[in-house]
Every structure is written in C-alpha cells, then in structure tokens.
Amino acid sequence: MTVPSQEHQPFAHLSAPNAVLYREILRVFARAKERFIVHLRPEEVAAELRRDNDDPLAQALEKLRDWGNLQADADTGRVTSVEDFHRKRYLFQLTPAGQAAEQAIAFYEEAIGRRGVLQSVALGDIAEQVQSLAVLARDEDPDPARVHLLLLSLAERFSSLADNAQAFMASLRRAIDFSDGDVAGFIAYKERLIEYINRFIADLANSGSRIAALLAELEESDYEKLLRLAARREAADAVPDGADAADAYAKAEEAAFSSWVNRWRGLRDWFVSIDVGRPSQARLLRQAAISAIKQLIDAVGLLNERRSGRSDRSADFRTLARWFAEAPNEAAAHRLWRAAFGLTPARHLTVTAATLDEWREVGAATSWRQAPPIRISPQLRRTGSYERRGKPNKVTDRTAARRLLLEQAEREAAETAAARARLRTGGPVLLSELGLLEPRAFRLFLALLGDALAARRPGDTEVKTVTGDGSMEVRLTLVPGGGAVEIHTEDGVLTGPEHVIEITDLVAG
C-alpha cells in the first residue's frame, strides 16, 4: 500500500487546473461503488471514460491519490513473472475521506439544482397525522409503537414540506430574475405557475388553520406524554456506554425527548403565530407566494413590452446623444434640440393682469376661438424683450385661501372627534345595539373592525388590538349562536355574525 505524500485534501481537486477530469474520474469510482465494485484498474477507468489509458489519466490518478481521494494498492493479481512484479501496477479505490467528499459534493449539487414543489398533499397528510395524535393524546394508555411511528411520519412529512417550499420559492425567484432567456417559454409557463401557486395558497390557508387548531388542542392536553413515549422507544435501541447501562438509557431518553420537543416547537412555529410581531412561517410563505405572483405578472408585462418592440427611455436618450454627437454644426444641434424637447423660448406668451382678469370670467368649456385674445406689445417684436414700466404687480393675497383651508381642517377634525365620541361604547355592547351610524362614524367603525379581524388568529373567538396611531382600542368577541346582525348606515347595510364589541378612546381616556 502506498502512503499519500501530504495531508488529506479531498476537495483540493475542485480548484485544480484539470478539475473537470478529476470530477469525471471520481464519478466513475462513485458509480462503481454503487455497483458494489471496490477496486478499479486504470484501464477500467479509461474504458468508463471512453478515452485512452494515457499519461494524463495516470497523472490524474496519482494526484487524486496524493490528495487523499483515492487509495492505491499493488495489483498482484496479474503477476506472472518477476518483470511483472517490478512493474508499477495499481488497483485504485475511494478512501473514506474521498467517499465523504463525493457525498458532500453530491448533496451540494442536489441542493443548488433543486427546484422544489409546493406540497398541497403534504398539508392534508400533516393535518390527518396531527388529528391521529390528538386522538391518541386523549387515550389513557396510548400504544408507544403507534405514537412513535406517527411522530416519525409527521416529522418526515413536515421536513419535506418545509424544505421543498423553501427550494421552490428560491427557484421561483431565480426564474423571475433570469426570465430574459426563453421569453416565449416563460410567458407560456407563467399562467400554469400562477394557477399552481394560487391553489397552494388556498390549500395552505384552509389546512394551515386546521393544523393550528389541532396543535392548540394537543397542547391543551398532555402532548408531552406522546413525545416521552417516542423518546423512550428510541432510547431502547441505545448502545450502553460504560458499566452503568441504566444511566446510559436515561441519558439517551432525555436526548431523544429534547430532540422531539425541538421538532414540535418547529412544527408549532410553522403553523401558529406567536403574536403580531412573530407571524407563523405558513403566513410568511403565503405572503411570499402572493408577492411572487405579483412579480410574475410584472415580469410578464415587461417581457410583453419588450416583445412588442417598445424601447426604454435610456435607449432613446442614448440614440439622441449619438444624434447630437453627429450634428454637423451648432445650428443643426439647436434645431435638433427644439425638435426633441420642444423647449423653444416662449417670450411672446407674456400674460398681463388685465388678460388674466378677462380669462377668469370665461368658463373652462369656452373654445379658444371665442376666448379673449392675448395682447402682445409691439416692443416685444422689435427688441425681443418686454419690461412693463411703472410699479410691479402686487403680491397676491392668499389670506382667504389659507382661512378656507384652516376652516376645512377644523371642520374635519370636529367631525372625526364626533365620530370617535359616537363609537365609544363605555363597556361591552352587542353589535346589534350600535344603532344608526353617521357616514364618518361608519367609516371609522369599518377601519376598527378590519384591524380587529386582521389581528385575530385562526380558531380564536376573542381579539384585542390597538389602531395603528395608538388612539383607539377595540375588543371583539364572537357570540356563539348569536346569528346574523345588520348595522344600518346612510351608505348601506353591513351584515355579519353577532359579536360583543368594546371600543375605548385612548386619547380621551
């Protein structure tokens, strides 16, 4: 057996000049190992690569041996003479370090090239498995084997769902960013993709709320009992460490239980929002999917504009700059300027105060033929400039306009204060007891109701929230069996389930 000349560097071949040849050789050994073939001769490697068994191949094998990817053993199986014995013949095989490097590279390439999927079916499976766990949690003596298998299946299904969703969103962002390659294919693909994402969003909203409710039900019961049963069953297969076997089993059980508690926490954080500041991963995924749909639509719109032959503004300005550079003289450049930008001097459009007064008396629908004309001084035609003699125009007095704006602001503030006072309940009341609401009070009520419903988590019957400006607080509680309620306003009738509502004005106290 030959000993490598340096420390193991199984990843050194990736940055070497002949990295492509090294990767091909190592893939040959990896495929051979999958066929349960351990040793390969140089001529066998050459046959797999469909190339000659020449010096570059021999040098590559030697370099891989020096880096620790391959192990070379003397090939004595075909020795028939002393001359054959002294000739260098080797059998090559992957070293443990080389095999570990190949597995790591294969995992990296799979993760980078992975597109991922949105597993709507997995959501249903997870819901059914959590439902089965909830049934077992109510049992006084659940079957440990069934509990363990259910938890293993749940962990595997959830891990697959999370990994695939993350990979899909990453691949979707790459598809949006690099959508310039195959324009026709991308446009044909986008409609099916948007429909696919929409279906997953709907499934995620329905199944996610069901899973969150089931997890809440499980946590109300003794769900840790199920995790302890699974940990105890895993610890039964632990190898005794030292003389005290009971202590080894106890340590293994605690380690397994801690692992299951951590997995359960990950499952809960994925489907259940902790508070307003920490939304669940399912909600974040739903928001990311909705944003991806918008980006897809925007990308397709941009591609359609490019396909229709429209040029962007930067290209127009570059073309115009080239025309200016190619202008034969300054006069041509000035003509190009006037044609391109239309900024010809407009000195003749001087308007006198008397003309403005005449225009104010004419309606906007009056034709320009019937409107008062603009009178231009003959001095402007002769000299090109015009300065009216005498005192300058008076500064326009805007006191009345400012007073009008102030009155309007005060009126709106008073109406808002009246609406806030109208909505203050002074305690819990039924929605049906609110009575007739004025238009401004009704609009404020709709904003409060929207904030409360947006803050309510799936399965909750009561919610308490504060408006974005921190001025009002609303508490909303569903009335079981309360039926439907109608709130009449001048804008229409609002219909919904009966709730108990309490609105507090935090500014007024």
Image (spheres, grey):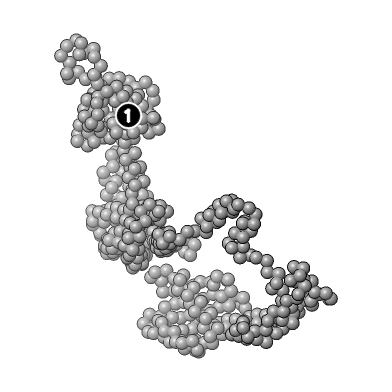
Q: Position of residue 407 (x, y in %)?
A: 68, 83
Q: Position of residue 412 (x, y in %)?
A: 62, 82
- Name the residue rendered at 33%, 53% in the picture: 116
The quarter of the displayed image where residue 198 is located: bottom left
Position of residue 478 in the picture relative to residue 79 (left or right): right
Q: Position of residue 334 (x, y in %)?
A: 64, 58
On the rendered image, what quadrant is the C terminus found in? bottom right
In the depicted structure, whether residue 87 falls above or below residue 154:
above
In the depicted structure, whether residue 488 falls above or below residue 347:
below
Position of residue 386 in the picture relative to residue 21 (left or right): right
Q: Nearer the viewer, residue 247 or 52?
A: 52
Q: Check disc 1 and give the amino acid type.
A: Asn
On the rendered image, what quadrant is the N terminus found in? top left
- Name the residue rendered at 63%, 85% in the picture: 370
Q: Residues within 10 Å of mark 1 (few under 14, many from 20)?
A: many
Q: Nearer the viewer, residue 279 or 111?
A: 111
Q: Provide the secondary structure element on which disc 1 rests.
A: loop
- Name the residue rendered at 28%, 47% in the picture: 234
Numbered-mark total: 1
Q: Position of residue 467 (x, y in %)?
A: 54, 72
In the depicted structure, whether residue 395 falls above or below residue 233:
below
- Name the residue rendered at 68%, 66% in the picture: 345
Residue that sits furthest to the top in the current view: 82
Residue that sits furthest to the right in the current view: 390
Q: Nearer the viewer, residue 86 or 331?
A: 331
Q: Which residue is mark 1?
A: 69
The quarter of the displayed image where residue 15 is located: top left
Can residue 257 be seen here?
no
Can residue 114 be seen here?
yes
